[in-house]
Image (cartoon, rainbow, N blue to C red):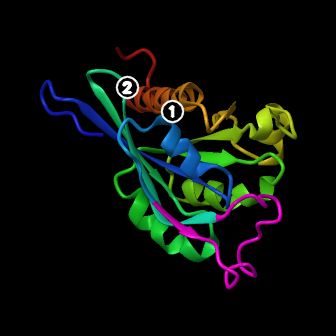
Amino acid sequence: MVVVGNKKIAAKFVIAGGFGVGKTTFVSAVSEIEPILTEAAMTFAGAEIDDASKVSEKTTTTVAMDFGRLSVDDDLVLYLFGTPGQERFGFMWDDLTIGAIGALVLVDSRRLTDCFAAIDYFESRDIPFVVAVNRFEGTMAHDVDDIHSALQLDEHVIVTNCDARDRYSVRAVLLSLFNVLLTQLMQRNLPDDPEIS
């Protein structure tokens, strides 16, 4: 996060998750600029690598990143970087997370195991994150509390749900992440001794 005098605060967030969970849709739904997308057609050669059986309508895939920008108000701008979902592009995650203050793990509740790599990645690097369950076709296969338990997340990790196609739903999730980060920052700045003020 960068603060310079009366200028805007700029915050970088990473949007991650498994193959076909809606990361590109999520970034595109909320970006106030034309998003930068690195979508490429899925090919027969990749069919053995990318399991598209659960997302049969998917014809393209992110091969580098998605990028979008959202001005929350006059003082806060969020820069959004969506990761590619396939394991073979995982080497790019280190570059994409440089300077990120937080992350969002997007989940398809029908394929929970696909998000473990993203959760492990952010936990191992101590990058604060929230989990958002994408409501495919308006429904979820599991309750939010059950998903939190199944993913064996720490108590402080928030699990919520969203519709990655809906701008207001996506914005609400991003603001939730920003509030988590502000809370953690304030807790770090509190004195260790409660009697000290």
Judge whether 131 appears above or below 85 on screen.
above
For the residue labelled by badge 2, is the local secondary structure a helix, a strand or a loop? loop
Q: Could you say where residue 166 lies in the image, as x and y percent from the top left?
A: 60, 31
User: Would residue 150 be found to the left or right of residue 118 on screen?
Assistant: right
Q: Residue 119 in the image: state x and y as whole percent.
A: 64, 54
Q: Front-most of 175 and 183?
A: 175
Query: Is disc 1 in contact with disc 2, using a CB cutoff of under 8 Å?
Result: yes
- Tell me the quarter of the image containing the N terminus: top left
Q: Is the magenta stretch mostly helix, strand or loop?
A: loop
Q: In what quadrant of the picture does the C terminus appear?
A: top left
Q: Quarter-wise, where is residue 186 in the image? A: top left
Where does label 1 land, which residue?
174
What residue appears at the point 41 percent right and 48 percent down from the top-left corner?
35
Q: Which amino acid does label 1 sit on?
A: Leu
Side of 131 where 91 appears, left or right:
left
User: Quick one: SS at disc 1?
Assistant: helix
Q: Which amino acid does label 2 sit on?
A: Val
Of residues 60 and 14, which is closer to you in this image? Answer: 60
> How far apart, in angstroms, are the residues tagged by discs 1 and 2?
10 Å
Q: Which residue is drawn at 67% across and 61% down?
A: 19
Query: Where does residue 36 sit, x and y in percent of width and height?
Result: 39, 54
Magenta stretch, residue numbers: 38-59
